[in-house]
Image: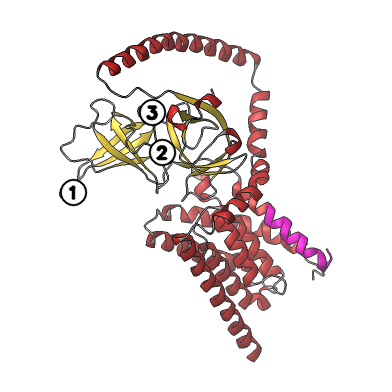
Amino acid sequence: MQSDNRGIAVCLTLILAVVLTLMPLSGDWIVWKPNFLLLVVMAWVLGWPNGVGIFFAASVGLLADLLLRMSPGHSMIVFALCAGALLLVSRWAKYLSMLQRTLLMALIITLVAVLEASIFIVYGLPSGIEHLPMKILLSIMVWPLIDLSIARLQPNRG
Amino acid sequence: MANVFSKSSSLLRKFLAVSLLAVLLMIIDSFTPWLKPAYSAVDNFVRPLYWIANIPLRVQEWSANSVTPRSEIESDNLRLTKESLIYHGQLQRMSDLAAENMRLRRLLNATELVQDSVLVTEVIGVSATPLRHTLTIDRGTADGVFVGQPLLDAEGLMGQIIGVHKHHSTALLITDSSHALPVQVLRNGLRSIAEGSADYNRLNLKFVSPTADIREGDKLVSSGLGGLYPAGYPVGTVLSIVSKPGDNFLEVDIDPSAEIDRSRHLLLLYTSRDNTADAVE
């Protein structure tokens, strides 16, 4: 894919992530559903660090807040924090194997889940902390698929 | 190495700017309605995406219907015909009872019972986060839907409308942790407040005294207090009652009557007070 088409690819993958986020699920599956928007943003930050950055991640976070009818700002901070952390290591991240990238994402997803649960506890909302292990596990399971798909959209793959 | 530090310093500045903006947005959202147009714009933007997101569910329903054997459809048809007959019979008795009730209320000089009418609607989206129990339905201002309107399924109260657009609306479910609903025990009229627990299968009763006459299995209906929900609609059944030593109130868990996370076809309720009853049936 040509470099100037990556903007379109970013938009299309984000729309797909929104559709997956909105997909109705019943029972515990709704609690375990991975944060597709965050995963897609992280994959783009790792794959195209010069094109997408903190402001892009924060904008998608704001969209997530409005989409999920949460107070705008929560996901914005979380997305920006994750993007910032990944941008710091993005220079080395491209040399990591898929397993190492998955482990890195597992660490970030766990930190995000714990951070979000802490924010909800502070606000007196149910944190759903008992569902975190399953949610983290499912997120880690879908990550390689998202990472590989977005890597295929990059030009000059070595 | 210097490049790494300058990069991290630039990232830190950007992150601080984003955090400041986020905090500002949180404050604006908490104290002003300025961000409502943004919510509305996002709702309008994602409406077609809800349709796409529902495709797997529709395919599943279609395939389930397609492979249903003819004998099963016939037996279903027979059962539904019988049920319809039974309900029609009960309805005749109900209209008689309603008329009698009206006469008695007039004798007591009480207000007349409001007449409720309904509009059938379909769920086109559910909340994407378990922390907010909301639904998106396919009716909006074009159908006379308004904020605060009660929503039912075939079994009981589901929630109320909190956001209306031209062709779709958003409803807050009774199980949402921010929702509270005045209820009464059907057996003895004991009043209480049913609060959402963020669990689709449970509500909590608030402020029930340890000496209150309430038992497991008691049916709860809306009390009509507060004026939002009309009285007499099923809310749930008492599941468990726990009395802890030293606590001022009982912990009462309720099993909601409505199939909160399963119903797809719902009813929007209009009472004669809404001035829109003639629009629907």
Tag 2's secondary structure?
A: loop
Label 3, secondary structure: give it. Answer: loop
Name the colour scheme.
Answer: secondary structure
| Disc 1 to disc 3: CB gap under 8 Å | no
**On screen, B106 above or below B160?**
above
Task: Identify the disc placed on residue B201.
Answer: 2
Range covered by the magenta-colored residues = A1-15
- Point out residue A113 in the picture as x, y percentages from the top left corner: 49, 61
- Location of residue A148 in the rendering, given as x and y in whole percent from the top left corner: 71, 60
Residue B247 tag number: 1
Does the rendering let one see residue B152? no
Considering the numbered disc 1 on the image, is that residue within a helix, a strand or a loop? loop
Q: Establish whether labels 1 and 3 are both on one chain.
A: yes
Do the residues indicated by labels 2 and 3 lie within the same chain of the protein?
Answer: yes
Q: Does residue B250 appear in the picture of this structure?
A: yes
Q: Locate residue A125 relative to residue A156 in the image: left or right.
A: left
- For the residues labelled 2 and 3, the Cα–Cα distance comes to 18 Å
Residue B107: image quadrant is top left
Question: Distance between the Cα atoms at labels 2 and 1?
Answer: 25 Å
First in sequence, mark 1 or 3: give its number. 3
Q: Which mark is residue B262?
A: none
Decide: is B121 above or below A112.
above
Q: Is residue B25 magenta?
A: no
Residue at far bottom of view: B2
Output the chain of dot 2. Answer: B
Callout 2 and callout 1 share a chain:
yes
Crowd around label 2: few <14 · some 14–19 · many ≥20 (10 Å): some
Who comes first in sequence, dot 2 or dot 3?
2
